[in-house]
Image (spheres, rainbow, N blue to C red):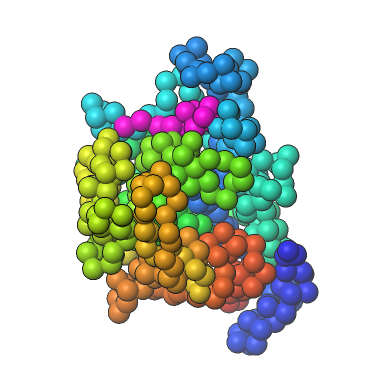
């Protein structure tokens, strides 16, 4: 798929100029060519949307001879690592990606002997491709970044990336989340630095999927005066504001996330261990008890209110207490940030709405009943902010629907990218208008 050409961008600018007659075409073209006229953008990826590196110390105890690979060799790319495609090495990948909840510290940590780091923080480099040696197979934000570059954005100058260890999440304020809180602190510092290096102009936060949840938490955990000083707009793409039914499939049966040749049962335990995955289970305050999410051959049924019982029944009893104590208070309410928010969401794509498990139980793939959404996140979740914040006088909220655009294709679909570029252009034109 080709990204919008410079001609397309100029056409979009011209259409905006017709609505702002006080701005000359020369000023608009200057805006597209010179960084000084652009609001800096920080891109926040979704789960699995950036590279993750690891090194294995002497404390790492391989479960098999195959898992000696990478031990003692220093830092290597753990995500995405193509060895996950080889069945004996899939287990090695999964055990290294596991994180563990420790009740004594009420927090999560890596597996023993596994140290991790997130490369290229501040740059988009680690988010373009999950493996730069497999660009065609692991492309992520490359098309979006290319489109923004055609507007004049430049990496590490006006365009920044905020990758993170997506296995970790956040918890309610009364509970520690060492990794997640550190990320919010790093993101806050990046916002302030990006604004300072761009003549104090406010930053546009653009977040995909899970990244939108982190972005909203960052805003609401800082003062209103700070938000309004540093953040111009929050733009979210495909964010699961109320979780997703597909996440229950991940917990119950594993999810290959489209990676071929991988047995989902081999990665299921690792996916269950992820703190952030619990964050996007279907939200009881949104899905309630009336929406039946799972049924089984032995006549058991589960709604979003039955999540603790569901976790126990699938064999993940250790996840029940963290879910009840750390996650439920976190997801109960989404506070308004007091800065403009625009949600871009895909619609009219078949999305798991209900899972029906047969005699094979949770180890077998279920029958899937589909409803509306973006193929991953249910429409009710994508539109949660609209349903909860509608009518608010103190919160600007727009929702842009993109029919037929899937959860991941929103980052590369031609029509979606044109919408994104049009919107970013409008925001920057506001700055030029005020300057004039």
Percent position of residue 247, x then y: 40, 52
- In the displayed structure image, the side of residue 98 where residue 175 appears, left or right: left
User: What residue is at 41 percent from the left and 43 percent from the top?
Assistant: 363
Percent position of residue 151, x then y: 69, 65
Magenta stretch: includes residue 100: yes
Query: Seen from this angle, which residue lies furthest top?
Result: 58
User: What residue is at 51 percent from the left and 29 percent from the top?
Assistant: 91
Q: Is residue 306 visible?
A: yes
Q: Quadrant of residue 389?
A: bottom left
Characterize the magenta stretch by its predominant secondary structure: helix
Give the mark count.
0
Q: Is residue 341 visible?
A: no
User: What residue is at 74 percent from the left and 75 percent from the top?
Assistant: 8
Percent position of residue 173, x then y: 25, 45
User: What residue is at 50 percent from the left and 51 percent from the top?
Assistant: 46
- In the displayed structure image, the side of residue 216 where residue 138 appears, left or right: right
Q: Quadrant of the C terminus?
A: bottom right
Task: Give, as a single range, the part of the protein colored magenta.
Answer: 91-101
């Amino acid at each position: 798929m080709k990204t919008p050409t410079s001609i397309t961008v100029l056409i979009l600018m011209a259409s905006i100029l017709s609505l702002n007659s006080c701005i000359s075409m020369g000023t608009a073209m200057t805006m597209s060519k010179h960084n000084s006229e652009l609001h800096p953008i920080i891109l926040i990826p979704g789960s699995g949307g950036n590279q993750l590196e690891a090194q294995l110390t002497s404390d790492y105890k391989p479960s098999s001879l195959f898992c000696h690979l990478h031990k003692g060799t220093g830092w290597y790319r753990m995500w995405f690592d193509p060895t996950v495609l080889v069945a004996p090495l899939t287990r090695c990948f999964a055990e290294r990606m596991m994180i563990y909840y420790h009740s004594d510290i009420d927090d999560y940590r890596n597996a023993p002997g596994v140290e991790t780091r997130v490369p290229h923080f501040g740059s988009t480099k680690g988010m373009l491709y999950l493996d730069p040696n497999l660009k065609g197979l692991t492309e992520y934000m490359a098309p979006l970044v290319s489109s923004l570059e055609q507007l004049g954005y430049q990496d590490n100058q006006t365009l920044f990336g905020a990758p993170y260890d997506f296995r970790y999440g956040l918890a309610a304020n009364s509970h520690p989340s060492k990794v997640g809180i550190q990320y919010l602190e790093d993101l806050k510092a990046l916002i302030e630095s990006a604004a300072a290096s761009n003549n104090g102009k406010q930053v546009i936060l653009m977040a995909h999927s899970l990244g939108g949840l982190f972005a909203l938490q960052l805003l609401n955990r800082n003062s209103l005066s700070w938000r309004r000083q540093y953040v111009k707009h929050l733009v979210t793409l495909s964010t699961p504001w109320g979780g997703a039914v597909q996440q229950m499939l991940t917990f119950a049966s594993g999810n290959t996330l489209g990676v071929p040749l991988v047995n989902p049962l081999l990665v299921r335990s690792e996916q269950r261990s992820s703190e952030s995955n619990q964050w996007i289970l279907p939200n009881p305050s949104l899905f309630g008890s009336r929406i039946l999410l799972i049924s089984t051959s032995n006549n058991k049924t589960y709604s979003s209110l039955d999540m603790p019982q569901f976790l126990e029944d699938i064999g993940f009893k250790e996840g029940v207490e963290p879910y009840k104590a750390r996650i439920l208070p976190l997801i109960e309410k989404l506070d308004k940030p007091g800065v403009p928010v625009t949600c871009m969401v895909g619609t009219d794509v078949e999305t798991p709405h209900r899972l029906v498990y047969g005699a094979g139980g949770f180890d077998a793939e279920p029958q899937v009943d589909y409803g509306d959404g973006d193929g991953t996140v249910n429409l009710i979740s994508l539109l949660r902010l609209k349903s909860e914040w509608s009518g608010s006088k103190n919160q600007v909220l727009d929702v842009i629907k993109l029919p037929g655009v899937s959860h991941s294709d929103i980052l590369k679909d031609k029509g979606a990218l044109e919408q994104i570029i049009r919107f970013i252009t409008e925001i920057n034109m506001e700055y030029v208008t005020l300057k004039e």
